[in-house]
Amino acid sequence: MIQNELSKAKDQDLIASVLAMKRAASLARQVAVQTGTAIVVTKDEKIIRRTAAELMTESLPDTNKPAAL
């Protein structure tokens, strides 16, 4: 199912599963940074290993962009 189809699903557990997966992914990134380990993700149908250093850089605010009010 794609995101649009999931939002129209009748089963509330199925709809909530998307948010649960996003929370789990976020927690996995946090734990990887805390423990200095890498995670493996897919992007554009390719398997990619992301190191803790890459994850830390990704989570830092961009200093070139103006802060949101």
Image (tube, rainbow, N blue to C red):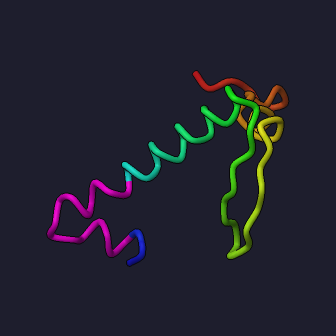
Q: Residue at x 76, y 62 (%)?
A: 48
Q: Residue at x 24, y 71 (%)?
A: 8
Quarter of the image for the N terminus: give it.
bottom left
Q: Would residue 25 be found to the left or right of residue 56 on screen?
A: left
Q: Nearer the viewer, residue 56 or 9?
A: 56
Q: Nearer the viewer, residue 68 or 10?
A: 10
Q: Position of residue 64 (x, y in %)?
A: 84, 30
Toward which corner of the image does residue 13 lie, by quadrant? Answer: bottom left
Q: Position of residue 16 (x, y in %)?
A: 28, 54
Give the magenta part as a residue range.
4-18
Q: Position of residue 21 (x, y in %)?
A: 43, 53
Above/below status of 2 relative to 16: below
Q: Majority secondary structure of the magenta segment?
A: helix
Above/below status of 64 relative to 44: above
Q: Would residue 19 be found to the left or right of residue 27 on screen?
A: left
Quarter of the image for the C terminus: give it.
top right
Q: Is residue 37 magenta?
A: no
Above/below status of 16 relative to 6: above
Toward which corner of the image does residue 2 lie, by quadrant? Answer: bottom left
Q: Position of residue 29 (x, y in %)?
A: 62, 40
Q: Would residue 36 be found to the left or right of residue 19 on screen?
A: right
